[in-house]
Amino acid sequence: MLAKRPPMGFNTWNTFGENISDSVIRETADAMVELGLRDAGYEYLVIDDCWSKRERDPETGKIDTYLSKVTLMATGGTGAVYATTTNPNIATGDGIAMVYRAKGKVQDMEFVQFHPTALYNPAERHPAYLITEAMRGYGGILRLPNGEEFMQKYDERLSLAPRDIVARAIDKEMKIHGLDHVCLDVTHKDPEETKHHFPNIYAKCLSIGIDITKEYIPVAPCAHYMCGGIKVDLDGQSTIRRLYAVGECSCTGLHGGNRLASNSLIEAVVYADAASRHSLEVIDQYDFNNKVPEWNDEGTMTNEEKVLIAQDAKEVNQIMSTYVGIVRSDLRLHRAWERLDLLYEETEHLFKRVKPTKDICELRNMINVGYLITRQAIERKESRGLHYTIDYPKHALDNN
């Protein structure tokens, strides 16, 4: 007997940015009904927006100190450490890096999920536009730019193979042929049906001069989701007492080494509820720590130093994408380690003598996160889930 189908939902994927209102939610829900999504089994709407707004006082740049009996990290993922990602610029792994520096346990950082089909557009890398896997489910075919199919070489499920297999296949074809992208082809499908099912993708591609009913969609893999992070227990509490973590910055273990699509949303809801319940039970046992020193705002920041910080961030992106990407090796990982170590020394020296800014704080965090991904990838002497290395191509259990 088949298990009952779980409820399906529609995710807005930052379509509305920060412009969320009651009318937008209602209009989107009405559009879902009109498009037939409710009849197809979609029962809820996920408003996954407001990614990109984070401002500090532009005049003072002052960092304030807030005391709390308990603290919850909900700082998101790490995609911005890579050159191309579906994540926003602020996904620099800040919470993970802070907990690591505070000696909290950080786990499974080697398991970085790369989405196989982001729209290839050099002008949009942070975030890159996501071409949903539903297009392959709809009948989209992965091809080289010359029209040749290639997935038959990698998996009998062809373009419907799991994300990690498709991402590795695309990565290999791009390297073999010296390409920046491959293509997703839906030109054989009915044009009106394509527009009806994928109006946003149709409009987005049309805005950069591509009519997907007549032309291939250029796609390439990019960093998408971090399965690892701050290790938490069933209450969402980290190894540092009073400190909780939920969402992508946390590591619950529920995703194993390879997250299934959309499971992160329900995980965040469940663990946020668990963390709130547990913290309410114990918060009266705690007192405020009044011995926290004020932040030292001394130092200056020259234009030259700002340029160096921006350049170093790009270098982190390049190191991680080149050496710690979809396919890894001991040589590549150790090369990344050496380059990140040099950046770490330079950045720490700079951080100690300049006035702290958002950019240098995020750069420190990016370097810490890159180091954690690289170190934990080096330590795993097998290929498992999202971590694939040519030096240990088998799962550990396959070697017995």
Image: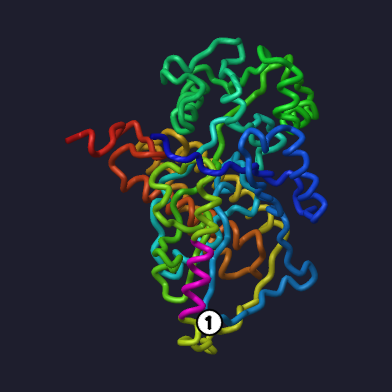
**Residue 344 located left or right of residue 398:** right
- In the depicted structure, whether residue 85 falls above or below residue 238: above
- Quadrant including the C terminus: top left
Secondary structure of residue under mark 1 = loop
Amino acid type indicated by mark 1? Lys
Query: Going by the picture, which residue comes out furthest to the front?
Result: 1
> In which quarter of the view is residue 9 placed?
top right
Residue occupying the point 73% across, 14% down: 214
Q: Is residue 336 magenta?
A: no
Q: Position of residue 140 (x, y in %)?
A: 60, 20
Pointer 1 residue: 69
Q: Position of residue 340 (x, y in %)?
A: 47, 50
Q: Is residue 280 magenta?
A: yes
Residue occupying the point 71% across, 15% down: 190
- In the depicted structure, whether residue 247 falls above or below residue 141: below
Question: Is the magenta region chiefly helix, strand or loop?
Answer: helix
Q: Position of residue 103 (x, y in %)?
A: 40, 69
Q: How is the image coloured?
A: rainbow
